[in-house]
Amino acid sequence: MDTTKILADLKKRPGFTENVGMVLVHNGVVRGWARADHAPVKSMKVSHDRAKMDAICREMEQQPGIFCIHAEAVEGELKPGDDVLFLVVAGDIREHVKATFSELLDRIKAEAVMRATGLAAIADDSGLCVDALGGAPGVHSARYTGNHDDSDADRYNLLLRNLGGRDDRAARFVCSLCCAFPNGDVLTAEGTCEGTILSAPRGENGFGYDPVFCPDGFDRSMAELTMEEKNAISHRGKALAQFRQKWEKYYDHQ
């Protein structure tokens, strides 16, 4: 995949300068470890439905503010570090681009799995989005430092350094969830937990960015909340609750 050429060609398209204020790029590579248990991965066989991927891209291009979407996937026997998926979403403002990108990635992953197994498949992406950092770390929250072996403290301390002394510290945890069915139907849901980034970590509970995130309505960090308090405002819990409502309506009409 010649990513430089793809981006250069995109900028030459008629209407680019008039309609695009943000281009979001995803270059997925094969990890050297399994996500579930961090077991070593030596290689993996990958296949994609090109027609289905193109259809998803064309459908998602109809979202508000989206100028164009480009997707490429690599097939065959791949090793850790090899490129596997390249996505480009170009649009007017970051709110439109980020929302479309998140749903696009979930749908491609979920529907690719569904087509391979013949079963319904659920995919989700969760992350922390900080307004002053243009939505970062976002989908890269778990790899914000660039090294998956780094600790949670390494990641949230990098976040604090990047924010510095900025006054705008608004942020949110976001969970985007997608379920694809063998008949081609797709259900999506999203949950958020609004809050602010603290100037220093507080608390011993939770994980990830919890020590530096203060949810709205509290004067404590997420890492200082009880499990009951945290579950009540969880972005994943909200996404699953929304999905359950959509699932029940979907099931009633089958």
Image: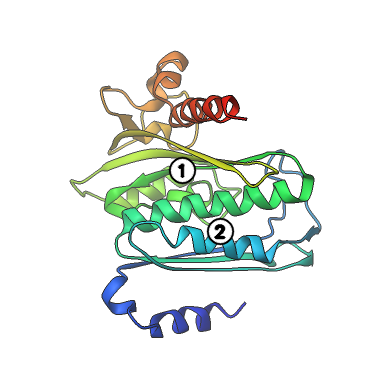
Amino acid type assigned to the residue bearing label 2 in the image: Ile
Q: Are marks 2 and 1 in contact (CB under 8 Å)?
A: no
Which picture quadrant has residue 90? Answer: bottom left
Amino acid type assigned to the residue bearing label 1 in the image: Gly
- Which quadrant is home to the C terminus? top right
Label 1: few (<14), some or many (≥20) within 10 Å? Answer: many
The percent coordinates of residue 173 (x first, y second) are 40, 38
Residue 40 in the figure: left or right of residue 241:
right
The percent coordinates of residue 227 (x first, y second) are 47, 17
Q: Is residue 7 visible?
A: yes
Q: Secondary structure at mark 2?
A: helix
The residue lying at 45 percent from left, 83 percent from top is 8
User: Front-most of 205 and 27?
Assistant: 27
As drawn, the label of residue 48 is: none
User: Front-most of 222 and 55?
Assistant: 55
Closer to the chain start, of discs 2 and 1, is: 2
The residue lying at 43 percent from left, 54 percent from top is 100
Residue underneath mark 2: 56
Residue 56 lies, with reference to residue 168, above or below; the image says: below
List the single residue furthest toward the front: 253
Residue underneath mark 1: 127
